[in-house]
């Protein structure tokens, strides 16, 4: 089976690539990530992926166009849905390419990250598979989370500290924002607990 795998970076590719190869699949990669900010981060992630591709003899096509402007045009005023919009922006071109090139299936390294919305990813991939009449190869790559980290460190790959977009960068480094988010989560949790107790 020839699979086109959307890749977000080198470290997140390590475990999914090895897993599919171990299953006997022929895997090619496609890097298309217009969400990444800033430009230096975009270049560093490409550099890490190129290093992995060289070491693992992994064929990967890299779209080097910096797409931040288009990403922001799509997301601004829709921040609450930014992850869904971001997934669609990255995955649809990948799925379309896989269908046009006669691949047997597609998948994505986003399924490796514990920080992504896994259920949403699965659903959007399922819808795209139906739209482009191509199989979606699903694997829960999160099972190899630590193994992927250990191997990426051993391979000396650049490891990014946040998801990629300007919003996740702020969430990673803005301590005040992180405290506000934590309080909001705790408040919602208490509210849910109260509602559950009352309904019993």
Image (cartoon, rainbow, N blue to C red):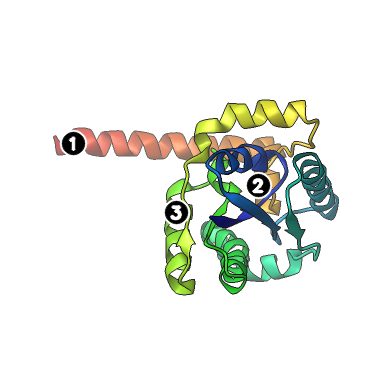
Give percent across and percent down for residue 46: 80, 50
Q: Check disc 2: other Cα within 10 Å, few if <14, some if 14-19, many if 20+.
A: some
Q: Nearer the viewer, residue 127 or 136?
A: 136
Identify the secondary structure beneath mark 1: helix
Give percent across and percent down for residue 105: 52, 60
39 relative to 23, above or below: below
Identify the secondary structure beneath mark 3: helix
According to the picture, the residue beneath numbered tag 1 turns out to be 198
70 relative to 8, above or below: below
Identify the residue at image location x=42%, y=37%: 187
Q: Check disc 3: other Cα within 10 Å, few if <14, some if 14-19, many if 20+.
A: some
Q: Check disc 1: other Cα within 10 Å, few if <14, some if 14-19, many if 20+.
A: few
Q: Nearer the viewer, mark 2 or mark 1?
A: 2
Q: Nearer the viewer, residue 140 or 38?
A: 140
According to the picture, the residue beneath numbered tag 2 turns out to be 168
Q: Quadrant of the C terminus?
A: top left
According to the picture, the residue beneath numbered tag 3 turns out to be 122
Q: Which badge, 3 or 2, is on the more N-terminal residue? A: 3
User: Does residue 150 appear left or right of residue 200 in this picture?
Assistant: right
């Amino acid at each position: 089976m020839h699979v086109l795998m959307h890749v977000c970076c080198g470290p997140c590719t390590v475990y999914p690539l090895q897993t599919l190869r171990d299953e006997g699949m022929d895997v090619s990669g496609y890097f298309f990530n217009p969400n990444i900010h800033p430009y230096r981060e975009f270049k560093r992630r490409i550099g890490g992926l190129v290093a992995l591709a060289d070491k693992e003899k992994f064929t990967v096509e890299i779209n080097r166009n910096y797409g931040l402007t288009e990403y922001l045009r799509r997301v601004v005023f829709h921040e609450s849905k930014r992850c869904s919009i971001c997934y669609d922006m990255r995955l649809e071109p990948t799925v379309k390419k896989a269908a046009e090139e006669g691949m047997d299936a597609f998948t994505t390294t986003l399924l490796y990250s514990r920080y992504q919305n896994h259920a949403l990813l699965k659903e959007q991939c399922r819808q795209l598979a139906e739209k482009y009449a191509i199989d979606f190869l699903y694997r829960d790559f999160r099972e190899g989370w630590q193994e992927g980290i250990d191997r990426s460190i051993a391979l000396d790959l650049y490891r990014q500290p946040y998801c990629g977009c300007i919003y996740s960068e702020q969430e990673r480094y803005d301590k005040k924002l992180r405290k506000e988010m934590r309080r909001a989560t705790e408040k919602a949790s208490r509210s849910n607990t109260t509602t559950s107790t009352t309904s019993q």
